[in-house]
Image: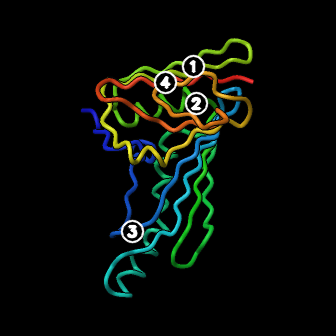
């Protein structure tokens, strides 16, 4: 049975099981190297509980801070390594979770496998040119959530993009899927 895709943030974190009701801002940055290696960084900033009482708020915040749900979700994707850094250990909290993956296509395949989402992934290389394509049979994502996901090249520029909005300097991409079947394509080179 296929797991539903509610938003790309839900897809990329897989399961963000927060204790109680925590509020804050989450951004996802995937640093893509010329060879296709990826460092995925999730920054959770200004996180705090919105519970009414101080004891309940403190309890929820400590549960959230010790939970490392993003790190657990990333480990399910079989990265080379995962690193968690508490940037601010007092209210409001900030945590950075970072995982390194050997190849962007492998990461995409693991996401689809973990979520039981039918789709195809391919990475083609020709000299210094790389082309990643991801096709999903169903695309039910919240476009507002997509603004929190950025793919940034460590070197070179994006030469072509489908299903993405590129930055003016063509070094960063933000997903913008269409209704129905989803097709994402990124081509980059130096």
Question: Marks 4 and 1, how far apart in space?
Answer: 15 Å
Q: Residue furthest top?
A: 126
Q: Residue furthest bottom?
A: 54
Find disc 2 in the rendering and name its residue. Answer: 104
Question: Marks 4 and 3, how far apart in space?
Answer: 34 Å
Image: 185 above or below 114: above
Find disc 1 in the rendering and name its residue. Answer: 123
**Residue 93 at x, y = what percent?**
53, 72
The C terminus: image quadrant: top right
- Helix, strand, or loop for circle 1? strand
Image-based side of 118 in relation to 62, left or right:
left
* Mark found first going from the N terminus, 4 or 1: 1
Contact, mark 4 vs mark 2 (Cβ under 8 Å): no
* Mark found first going from the N terminus, 2 or 3: 3
Find disc 3 in the rendering and name its residue. Answer: 22
**Residue 79 at x, y = what percent?**
58, 40
Find disc 4 in the rendering and name its residue. Answer: 162
Contact, mark 4 vs mark 1 (Cβ under 8 Å): no
């Amino acid at each position: 049975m296929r797991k539903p895709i509610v938003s790309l943030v839900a897809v990329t974190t897989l399961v963000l099981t927060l204790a109680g009701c925590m509020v804050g801002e989450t951004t996802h940055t995937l640093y893509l190297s010329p060879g296709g290696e990826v460092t995925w960084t999730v920054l959770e900033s200004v996180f705090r509980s919105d519970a009414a009482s101080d004891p309940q708020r403190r309890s929820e915040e400590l549960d959230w801070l010790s939970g490392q749900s993003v790190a657990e979700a990333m480990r399910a994707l079989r990265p080379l390594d995962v690193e968690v850094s508490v940037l601010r250990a007092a209210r409001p909290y900030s945590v950075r979770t970072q995982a390194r993956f050997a190849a962007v296509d492998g990461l995409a395949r693991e996401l689809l496998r973990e979520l039981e989402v039918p789709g195809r992934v391919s990475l083609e290389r020709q000299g210094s040119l790389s082309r990643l394509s991801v096709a999903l049979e169903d695309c039910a994502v919240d476009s507002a959530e997509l603004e929190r996901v950025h793919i940034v090249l460590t070197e070179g520029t994006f030469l072509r993009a489908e299903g993405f909005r590129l930055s003016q300097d063509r070094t960063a991409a933000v997903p913008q899927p269409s209704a129905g079947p989803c097709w994402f394509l990124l081509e980059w080179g130096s």
